[in-house]
Amino acid sequence: MSSRSAAIALTLLLGAVAGYAQDYNGPPPPKADVPYLLHAENLVETEHAVAQPEDRKKQTAHVIPGAASPVRTPLAEPIFILLSENLPPQNMQLYQMTVNKKTGNRETVFPKKPGKRTPRPKHLTFKRVNDNVYWIEVNEVLDNGQYCLTPKGADDVFCFEIY
């Protein structure tokens, strides 16, 4: 396939995906301000938790109890549907979590002095599909593991696992 043909195919594919988001006619989320994973025609509620900040020598860990989320998806680029009342979708950030081998809990660790090892949120896009319903799409391939969506500056997290 020539590079021109590949570029045309990619443009058509991206246009189809964008059109699907704008024409979303699936079920509305049952709860407001909770992201739901989109699995075909089904919405799967993410695990809601409150991350507990844990002060350490040179870092702060945000800890979630348990080694794994009960909410699982095989999709490496998941899509979420959010009915927004008080939670602006543009404030959402997605982070990968690690499992602390000593405690068995999930955590994301931020150094007290930002630098190269500071976790970076994954790339997301946001599209309004109707009224206060939003399509949130991960724009990079995610590895298997634990993840959480969190509003900027909040301790609320919405967790899931990619397997």
Image: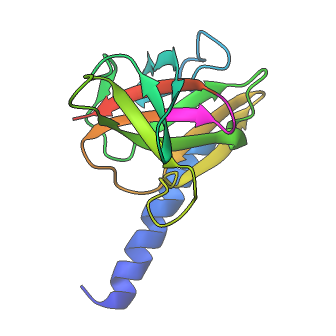
Residue 162: give x, y in percent of width and height: 28, 36
Is any atom of residue 45 visible in this view?
yes
Q: Left or right: where does residue 112 sit relative to residue 160?
A: right
Residue 26: give x, y in percent of width and height: 53, 24
**Image quadrant occupied by the N terminus:** bottom left
Residue 4: give x, y in percent of width and height: 39, 89
> Please, is residue 60 above or below residue 142 in the view?
above
Residue drawn at 31 percent across, 40 percent down? 75
Please tell me how many numbered marks the rendered image carries.
0
Q: Nearer the viewer, residue 149 or 83?
A: 149
Q: Nearer the viewer, residue 102 or 140?
A: 102
Quadrant of residue 132 within the rendered picture = top right
Q: Nearer the viewer, residue 2 or 84?
A: 84
Q: Nearer the viewer, residue 101 or 39?
A: 101
Residue drawn at 42 percent across, 22 percent down? 64
Residue drawn at 59 percent across, 51 percent down? 125
Q: Is residue 24 covered in magenta?
A: no
Is any atom of residue 128 visible in this view?
no
> Please, is residue 73 above or below residue 90 in the view?
above
Per the rendered image, the range of residues in magenta is 149-154
